[in-house]
Amino acid sequence: MDLTPSLVSAARALAQIDLGQLAEISGLDTEALVRFEQGLSGLDNASLDALRKAIDHFGVEFLPAGDAGPGLRLKFNTQETGQLLNWEQEGGTPGENEVP
């Protein structure tokens, strides 16, 4: 599936993230993402791959194009996605797991 500006915008809306958050996780420049979403410029294959991985990181899954075209859905419900994002931002040092 081609990663289009409208799919990226829809993915951000589903995940409830802004361009800054997407830029941080994808490693791409915020301005490059703005221009891409506005359809003013494209991205190379490596950048598109990084963008797809970042969108996946936020719990958005791409659905194959069917009769209605490509689609998106959350891998987790909104509450679970919010909890995961909060846990990732808690910081601190990881503790040791004491699993028998």
Image: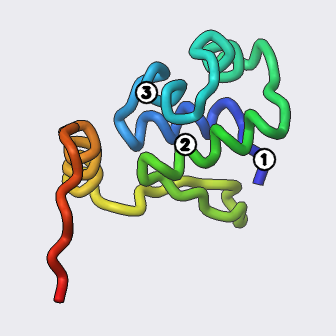
Query: Callout 2, which amino acid?
Result: Ala
1 or 2: mark nearer the eye: 2
Q: Residue furthest bottom?
A: 100
Q: Residues within 10 Å of mark 2 (few under 14, many from 20)?
A: many
Query: Which quarter of the picture shows residue 71?
Result: bottom right
Q: Quadrant of residue 48?
A: top right
> In the rendered image, which quarter contains the N terminus?
bottom right
Q: Few, some or many C-alpha atoms within 10 Å of disc 3 (few <14, some 14-19, many ≥20)?
A: some
Residue 32 sits above or below residue 66 on the image: above
Residue 94 location (% of width, % of height): 23, 52
Query: Are the two marked residues, 1 and 2, in contact with CB atoms closer than 8 angstroms?
Result: no
Q: Amino acid at mark 3?
A: Gln
| Residue at the disc numbered 3 | 21
| Among numbered discs 1 and 2, the one appearing first in the sequence | 1
* Residue drawn at 54 percent across, 53 percent down: 72
Relative depth, front residue between 68 and 62: 62
- Label 1: few (<14), some or many (≥20) within 10 Å? few
Q: In the rendered view, does 63 fall on the left or right side of 97?
A: right
Residue 54: numbered disc: 2
Numbered marks: total = 3
Q: How is the image coloured?
A: rainbow
Res 2 label: 1
Q: Say which residue appears at 59% left-offset and 36% top-offset.
A: 8
